[in-house]
């Protein structure tokens, strides 16, 4: 079982969307996926929501009221999730750094655990990183975004030696200024694995309509997710 955290200290980078899309793609190949929504905004939970869900959520697990196994919602044969909660804001700085590692070890019937982290930095983030095999940092391309990635990489290096994969998201090949910053990212993070994910209009449609990736109109998205999967797991087989 591989655990992957999607994290950036800066919001608005497409972190939740990429977490969801990669999980959807991995599930379409027959893998068992468990999503953990740590973000108090609960965007991932909204996408995965069922008519009937467990009363308890990630807050109850982090607060030691229940264990992780007790709050897993099964969406379909291959996708399960633990719902997020606004109340996570109350304890995210008090979470034990070993908490998520211990809880994830309780589950053993999944191929991948994908963690959607909030855009902040506190004990909850440290706990997620400690529990992960791979850290994915989705980022837009700008000087401000470069600064955020530098912060994340520096902080994570002090927490754990972990494979870090930087995804430059919503890349438009036609924008010259973006190309200039793209070169700067590559120079600044030469030691990291870097992928690009294009700005594709169908992404929002998949999420809003809760569609599968099987539609012909989503072929381009699926092709890019296939490349992303190969890049992320290169050297992690």
Image (tube, rainbow, N blue to C red):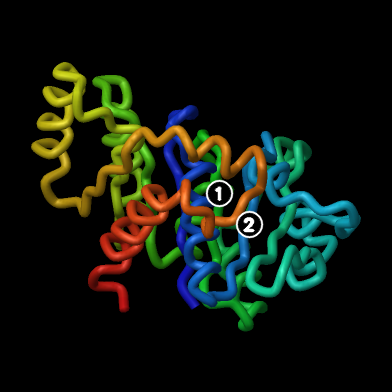
Task: Identify which residue is drawn at 38% across, 62% down.
Answer: 134
10 Å neighbourhood of mark 2: few (<14), some, or many (≥20)? Answer: many
Pinpoint residue 195: horizontal percent, then vertical percent: 25, 48
SS for callout 1: strand
Quadrant containing the C terminus is: bottom left
Task: Identify which residue is drawn at 60% across, 42% down.
Answer: 207
Does residue 20 appear left or right of residue 142 in this picture?
A: right
Image mark for residue 86: none
Task: Identify which residue is drawn at 22% across, 48% down.
Answer: 194
> Residue 29 versus residue 68: which sits nearer the camera?
29
Does residue 227 appear left or right of residue 126 in this picture?
A: left
> Residue 191 versus residue 215: which sits nearer the camera?
215
Pinpoint residue 126: horizontal percent, then vertical percent: 49, 51
In space, the residues marked 2 and 1 are separated at their CA atoms by 6 Å
Does residue 8 appear left or right of residue 71 in this picture?
A: left
Pinpoint residue 149: horizontal percent, then vertical percent: 31, 36
Q: Which residue lies furthest to the top in this view?
A: 177
Question: Which residue, given by chain and number where applicable, does mark 2 sit on?
Answer: 36
| Above-or-below relation of 38 to 22 | above
Quadrant of the rendered structure where residue 98 is?
Answer: bottom right
Quadrant of the rendered structure where residue 99 is?
Answer: bottom right
Residue 2 visible within the image? yes
Quadrant of the rendered structure where residue 105 is?
Answer: bottom right
Of labels 2 and 1, earlier in sequence is 2
Pinpoint residue 130: horizontal percent, then vertical percent: 47, 61
Q: Do the residues labelled 2 and 1 touch (CB within 8 Å)?
A: yes
Question: Which residue, given by chain and number where applicable, does mark 1 sit on?
Answer: 116
Task: Identify which residue is drawn at 20% across, 29% down.
Answer: 173
């Amino acid at each position: 079982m591989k655990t992957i955290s999607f994290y950036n200290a800066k919001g608005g980078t497409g972190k939740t969307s990429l977490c969801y899309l990669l999980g959807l793609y991995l599930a379409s190949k027959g893998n068992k996926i468990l999503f953990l929504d740590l973000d108090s905004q609960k965007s991932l939970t909204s996408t995965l929501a069922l008519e009937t869900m467990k009363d308890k959520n990630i807050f109850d697990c982090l607060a030691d009221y229940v264990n992780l196994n007790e709050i897993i919602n099964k969406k379909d044969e291959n996708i399960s999730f633990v719902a997020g909660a606004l109340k996570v804001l109350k304890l995210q700085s008090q979470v034990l750094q070993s908490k998520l590692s211990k809880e994830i070890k309780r589950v053993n019937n999944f191929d991948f655990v994908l963690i959607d982290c909030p855009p902040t930095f506190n004990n909850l983030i440290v706990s997620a990183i400690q529990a992960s095999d791979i850290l994915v940092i989705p980022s837009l391309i700008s000087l401000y975004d470069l600064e955020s990635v530098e912060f994340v990489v520096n902080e994570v290096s002090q927490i754990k030696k972990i494979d870090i994969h930087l995804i430059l998201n919503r890349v438009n090949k036609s924008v010259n200024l973006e190309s200039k910053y793209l070169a700067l990212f590559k120079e600044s993070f030469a030691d990291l694995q870097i992928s690009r994910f294009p700005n594709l209009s169908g992404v929002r449609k998949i999420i809003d309509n809760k569609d599968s990736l099987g539609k012909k109109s989503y072929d381009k998205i699926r092709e890019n997710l296939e490349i992303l999967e190969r890049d992320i797991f290169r050297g992690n087989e």
